[in-house]
Every structure is written in C-alpha cells, then in structure tokens.
Amino acid sequence: MLSYPDINPVAISLGPFQVHWYGLMYVVGFVAAWFLGRRRAARIGLSPDDIGDLLFYAALGVVLGGRLGYALFYGLDQWLADPLWIVRVWDGGMSFHGGLLGVLVAAWWFARKKGLAFLTLTDFVAPMVPIGLGAGRIGNFINRELPGRVTEMPWGMPFPGLGPEARHPSSLYEAALEGAVLFVVLWFVTATPRRRGLASGLFLALYGAFRFLVEFYRLPDAHIGYLAFDWFTMGMLLTMPMIAAGLGLIAWSRRQPVDARIGTP
C-alpha cells in the first residue's frame, strides 16, 4: 500500500492571493494546445495567430460549460444552497461533459467565423485536448478529489478523509488513459492524410471507453451514488452517448474521401 502524497493544493500564496495547482493544470493544458496548434495551423488554412483566438473561445467554452455542466449534472443542490459557489472554480467541480459541449459550441462559432467545415476544425482540435485532460486529472489528484474504490492492489493508497483502507488512485488512471494514451493515438493518427471525422470520432469513442472503464474503479459522487445495479454511475450514463456518437462518426468517416490537406505538410 502506498501513502497518499501530502501536496498543498495551493501552489503559490502571496498574502490573500493564492494560485491553486488545479488552476495551473488548466494553464498547462492551454499552453500545450497553443504550442501544438501553431505547429499544425497551416494544414487547415489558419495562421499561428488564429490559434490564440481559437483557444480564447475554447477557454470560455471549457470554463463556462464545464462549471455549468457540473452544477446541473452533479451539484444542483449545492448551487441552490450557495449561489456564489458556481464562480469558485478554483475549489474544483468541473464536468468534462459540460466542458466538451462548451468547446463544441466555441468550435462551431470559430469555424463559422473562419469559413471552415465544423468537422475539419474538430479533427484539428482533437489531438490538442488530451494533454489538458491529463493535467486536469492530476489537478484532481492534488485537490484530493475523485476517490477510488477500495482495493487490495499494491499501488492502492488511503484517501484523505475516507479512512485507512487502500483505494484505487482513479484520477491517475484517468490521467494516463485520457491524457497520455489518447494523445499518442490521436497525434499519430492525425500525422498523415485521413478521412474527415475520423479523429473526432476516435476522440469521442476512446475517451468514452476509457472513462467508462475507470468508473468501475472510482467512487460515485456521494450525493448521487450508484444509479443502478450497485455499479452504474452518472459518469457512465453521460459517457454512453459519447461512445455511440464516436462510433457513428468513425463509420461515417469511412465513406469520406481522404483529405490530403490535413496530412503532414
């Protein structure tokens, strides 16, 4: 059994001013996306400066959609009891599914503004996302969020505030799968010419499958619990449409011609 690392959730503290690790993880994600996007911007007719505009819209979508999605899917009672809670993003409480919807709205707006096909833009964006997802899960781990279920595996660790039992470090599982593995797959798939919609479909299907799998090792939110069967969670329910949509996009993409513009320059 391992010990849970004692990391202060506050990375920098200058009097009343505090910078939390959780917030810094978002910075890591956006800086990585900015760097990767500038490398490939010319493929779809964007300039490096356009990537900054795209990330501005995406950041708004992530924060607004992620927070609102968490409030609606997981924290409605908390929001009603404390209306100002929704603006305290640094305390944690972001929904990936809400953030995804926010980013899709931002991508639709940006694609329309630049005269791009929506799926051309989402295919471009897909491999830029996983690093931010992985960093966010590490932020959850530092914030002592998303505890895992009890385990006898040697890498289990007691979760702060939940007793001495060893638990799966489920947020680290998600960091590895949704972050590292998903990035490697999408980056190499998009390194050569491909059919439109393939990268977007792979992102949805693989993220959905990884999230569904990890839900078996992660405790459900205490105020929601299991939805059915003593194992089916809200995370699984929200992820199932993603998997279906991803598989549908992959099947649709097989009927599209290979787009030589979006391969390696």
Image (cartoon, helix red, strand yellow):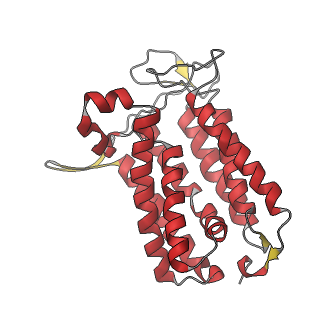
Q: Is residue 54 above or below residue 92?
A: below
Q: Position of residue 204 (x, y in %)?
A: 67, 50
Q: Is residue 155 above or below residue 96?
A: above
The residue at the far left in this view is: 15
- How many labels sit on residues? 0
Please name whichever residue, 133 or 62, is drawn nearer the observer in this view of the structure. 62
Q: Position of residue 86 (x, y in %)?
A: 31, 41
* Residue at image coords 54%, 26%: 148
Q: Position of residue 127 (x, y in %)?
A: 63, 62
Please name whichever residue, 112 or 17, is drawn nearer the observer in this view of the structure. 112
Please name whichever residue, 249 or 10, is drawn nearer the observer in this view of the structure. 249
The C terminus - image quarter: bottom right
Whether residue 25 appears in this view of the structure is no
The N terminus - image quarter: top right
Q: Quadrant of residue 235?
A: top right
Q: Quadrant of residue 75?
A: top left
* Residue at image coords 46%, 24%: 159
Q: Position of residue 208 (x, y in %)?
A: 66, 43
Q: Report whether 35 appears left or right of 91.
A: right
Whether residue 82 appears in this view of the structure is yes
* Residue at image coords 58%, 63%: 128
Please name whichever residue, 68 or 174, is drawn nearer the observer in this view of the structure. 68
* Residue at image coords 78%, 80%: 260
Q: Quadrant of residue 122?
A: bottom right
